[in-house]
Image (cartoon, rainbow, N blue to C red):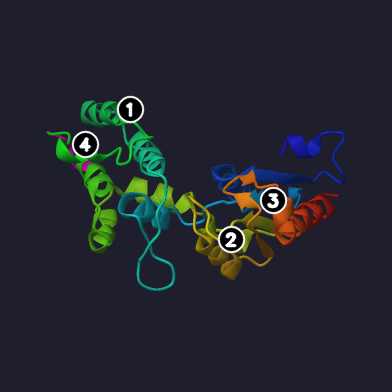
Amino acid sequence: AGGADAAETRAGRIGIVGVSIGGTLALLVAAVPELAPRISVVVAIAPFTDLEKVMMLATTGMYRGSGRPEPYPVPPSLAVGLARSLVAALPSTPDVLALGFALERLDPLSPDPLRTLRESPCRSLGPDASTVQALLLNRDPSRFADLYAALPEDVRRAVAMLSPVRSAARMTAPVEIATAPRDKYFPLAESLALQRVGPHVRITVTSALAHATPRMSLGNLVALVQLEGFFARSLSAAS
């Protein structure tokens, strides 16, 4: 809100731009009732909108859209980032710190960074840490729902709060999203789910993006025109 009060803003409103997880955070801010009236537009590039589905994707390599889970390969680093974030959400007890230390030693660039922990899981964990570890090490999509339900209530509440699809109905500003047809981290279905519940969501699907990085190629003029239109609409809405 402080930025919206700056002298250079128009009518006390600002546009918010975010890329990848930053785009997700921008969507969450736009749904805060006290802030929504101060936002002119939300511009998000390749965000995720449902953290529970992303958790399943990161741990099992399967994504559940509107039907049965389907394979969707993602970089191994996604599982490491998820694991460290989940453990950071737990109280700092000795067993949680031990699990966190084990995760810090993982190499996110290895083909299967959680393999070491899967082969030698942390022992003597309390109930909270043990349920998180069980979910992280699971690779069977049919078990995910039960493992997720066993997580501490505070963790599940945080997952819901970090999922813009749960709060999209409260967004009042126009939302412009750009994403690749098959983003390497977050499926297009993540943005489409937001569009189904958000009142002012527009999605630009363009192969001129590789996750958050533009692909500038004269051989793909249609994709470049799509991306240019996305930026033009975003700037127009902000002004």
The image's mark for residue 117 is 4
Instruction: Identify the residue at the far front of this view.
Output: 219
Residue bounds of the magenta highlight: 124-128
For marks 2 and 1 on the same chain, the one whose residue lies earlier in the sequence: 1
Say which amino acid is labelled 4.
Leu
- The part of the image, by quadrant, that contains residue 176 is bottom right
- In terms of secondary structure, where does tag 3 sit? strand
Say which amino acid is labelled 1.
Glu
State if disc 1 and disc 2 touch (CB < 8 Å).
Answer: no
Alpha carbon separation for disc pair 4 and 1: 11 Å
* Residue under label 2: 168
**Residue 196 inside the magenta-drawn segment:** no
* Residue under label 3: 43
State if disc 3 and disc 4 touch (CB < 8 Å).
Answer: no
User: Does residue 205 appear left or right of residue 137 in this picture?
Assistant: right
Residue 173, visible in the rendered structure:
no
Say which amino acid is labelled 3.
Val
